[in-house]
Image (cartoon, helix red, strand yellow):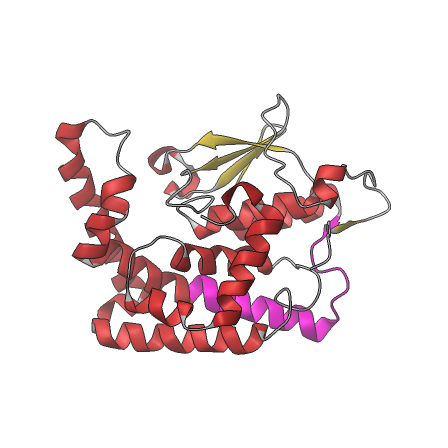
Amino acid sequence: MQAHVAQRSATSNPTVSPAAAAGRDLSVKQKGAIALHRFGPYLGTPDSSPFVIKVMMLLKLAGLSFREVQGNPFKAPQRFLPYIVDDGATVADSSLIRAHLERKYGVDFDAGLDPVQKAQAWAIERMCEDHLYFAMLESRWLDRRIFREGLGKHMFGPIPAPFRPLVKGMLRRMNAKRLAGHGLGRHRKTDIAALARRDVDALAGLIGEKPCLMGERPCGADGFVFGIITAILTPPIESPLRAAMAGHANLVAYRDRLTRHFFPDLAGR
């Protein structure tokens, strides 16, 4: 995979740091940098949310310094993470954050893609964000064993112990309601797993042996595609969804390749 920073327009600052060009960690703790409000690292992944990982990837692709801030979804815009604060402007939702970066910094995350490829990348991202993600959400939050070994064990440390059972129960109910509203949560677990396998199989076929989703270079959609693949694969918690993903050697290789490139501190974990 070629080292790549998304192209900027002629009106943007063309200078890109060597760290950005090499795909190294750009989460510089400096005053004035973009503040990314996120959950935090989770079982060998950059964050527990693939949407946060997407924004991390976009910021790295854009060559922009950012600092990570412990977020609180209950106080976040729309009550979701991630969101960023950039020069006093608060932007929530990973796709709106992408639009903000493109508009303010003149970044073209899909430079080199023709109109058909751009449409394909957008459609693949929508499949992953609006369908496959919810299958992962169902597995993480509603499967009692997986929740107990995963989020329930590792993500509630900051909450005082006496309140943890109450908060865990509340969040599991909230996510069950969210899944029912989406529609996927109304199905039987076996049907959810079967639908998710079709997403995974399609993703494996679309990536094939290419280094990145659409070719040699990462594009904007690689942010979430990498996020969801690593979120499903990396936590060492067995599930039908993880088994389906791990059954495709090219998806495992894609995860490993982009981890080495963008998150080298996590490579090999």
Q: Nearer the viewer, residue 20 or 209?
A: 209
The answer to which quarter of the image holds residue 38 is top left
- Please tell me which residue is depicted at 55% across the width and 51% down the height of the picture: 259
Main SS of residues in magenta: helix
Q: What number of labels is visible?
A: 0
- Please tell me which residue is depicted at 23% across the width and 55% down the height of the picture: 146
Determine if the magenta segment contains residue 111.
Answer: yes
Kindly give the residue lying farthest to the top in the view shown. 31
Q: Is the N terminus in the top left, top right, bottom left or bottom right quadrant?
A: bottom right
77 relative position to 67: left or right: left
Q: Nearer the viewer, residue 109 or 265?
A: 265
Kindly give the residue lying farthest to the right in the view shown. 10
45 relative position to 236: left or right: right
Residue 110, compared with residue 36, is above or below; it is below
In magenta, the rendered stretch is 107-130
Determine if the magenta segment contains residue 25.
Answer: no
**In the rendering, at what x and y percent does residue 230 appear?**
46, 56
**In the rendering, at what x and y percent does residue 95 appear?**
55, 53
The answer to which quarter of the image holds residue 159 is top left
Q: Nearer the viewer, residue 243 or 129?
A: 243
- Please tell me which residue is depicted at 46% across the width and 73% down the height of the picture: 248
Specify whether residue 93 is in view: no
146 relative position to 81: left or right: left
**In the rendering, at what x and y percent does residue 94 appear?**
52, 49
- Please tell me which residue is depicted at 72% across the width and 72% down the height of the picture: 115
The answer to which quarter of the image holds residue 35 is top right
Specify whether residue 76 is in view: yes
**In the rendering, at what x and y percent does residue 13 appear?**
82, 38
Residue 37, compared with residue 57, is above or below; it is above
